[in-house]
Image (cartoon, helix red, strand yellow):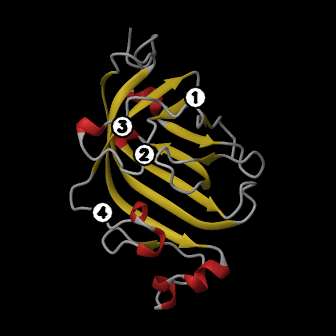
């Protein structure tokens, strides 16, 4: 079997290349309750896996559960590598993601006025700013700053165009020992078909 033909337990790097959307943009909301009991986040998420192992993940965070009031847009970029098959989860492989940059745009005027980093100047409303090294502490550790060498240790499920990643806690998997052991079954992402926007 070639690495472009997934079996019951293995898929190849070429299978993963593409764009995946979590939830129906503009209609069905999707939200994530942190297992550690932190506040809910309401967001849409899009994964893009490129040839030569580049990736980006785009989040749009909303103020409401219906996902009608966008507040922040974020883009995480880096490199990805697939490792061995997961020993217990079918259609799942271990994966490492090296995160190289984080860019944020504040799209809600009220939130913009309340954000210290925006009020200090040099960050126009709605425009992306690289916060990889400075971070944006108004929004918490998810938004940087990044360590010089940052790798996210994860698991990836792929079957019939459905993508899932590992179930997270508030502490990201910054060591191989902290790699997730379960999938985010409630948060699948669906592969974008040709011609779909």
Sequence-first disc among 1 and 3: 3
Front disc: 2 or 4: 2
Q: Nearer the viewer, residue 114 or 149?
A: 114
Sequence-first disc among 1 and 2: 1
Give yes or no for contact between labels 4 and 1 (Cβ–Cβ under 8 Å). Answer: no
What whole-number distance in Å separates the C-alpha atoms at marks 1 and 3? 16 Å
For label 3, the SS is strand
Residue at far left of view: 149
Q: Residues within 10 Å of mark 4 (few under 14, many from 20)?
A: some
Residue 163 in the figure: left or right of residue 85: right
Q: Give the residue number, with chain letter if any, for mark 4.
A: 146
Q: Residues within 10 Å of mark 3 (few under 14, many from 20)?
A: many
Q: Nearer the viewer, residue 76 or 61?
A: 61
Q: Give the residue number, with chain letter if any, for mark 3.
A: 154
What whole-number distance in Å separates the C-alpha atoms at marks 1 and 2? 22 Å
Residue drawn where x is 41% and y is 74% of the image: 137
For label 1, the SS is strand
Sequence-first disc among 2 and 4: 4
Q: Residues within 10 Å of mark 1 (few under 14, many from 20)?
A: some
Q: Give the residue number, with chain letter if any, for mark 1.
A: 162
Q: Residues within 10 Å of mark 2 (few under 14, many from 20)?
A: some
For label 2, the SS is loop
Residue 29 in the image, given as x and y percentages of width and height:
71, 48
On residue 169, the disc is 2
What whole-number distance in Å separates the C-alpha atoms at marks 4 and 1? 29 Å
For label 4, the SS is loop
Residue drawn where x is 65% and y is 36% of the image: 194
What whole-number distance in Å separates the C-alpha atoms at marks 2 and 4? 18 Å
The picture quadrant where one finds residue 5 is top left
Q: Nearer the viewer, residue 99 or 174?
A: 174
Q: Quadrant of the N terminus?
A: top left
Sequence-first disc among 4 and 3: 4
């Amino acid at each position: 079997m070639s690495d472009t033909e997934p079996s019951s337990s293995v898929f190849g790097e070429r299978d993963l290349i593409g764009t995946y959307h979590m939830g129906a943009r503009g209609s069905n909301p999707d939200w994530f309750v942190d297992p550690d009991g932190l506040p809910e986040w309401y967001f849409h998420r899009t994964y893009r896996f490129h040839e030569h192992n580049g990736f980006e993940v785009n989040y749009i965070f909303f103020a409401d559960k219906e996902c009608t009031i966008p507040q922040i847009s974020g883009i995480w970029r880096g490199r990805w590598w697939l490792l061995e098959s997961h020993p217990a989860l079918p259609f799942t492989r271990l994966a490492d993601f090296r995160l190289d940059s984080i860019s944020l745009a504040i799209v809600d005027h009220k939130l913009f006025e309340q954000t210290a980093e925006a009020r200090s100047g040099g960050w126009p409303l709605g425009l992306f700013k690289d916060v990889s090294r400075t971070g944006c502490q108004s929004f918490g550790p998810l938004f940087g700053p990044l360590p010089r060498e940052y790798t996210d240790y994860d698991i990836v499920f792929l079957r019939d165009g459905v993508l899932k990643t590992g179930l997270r806690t508030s502490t990201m998997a910054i060591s191989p020992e902290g790699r997730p052991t379960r999938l985010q079954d409630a948060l699948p992402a669906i592969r974008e078909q040709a011609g779909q926007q």
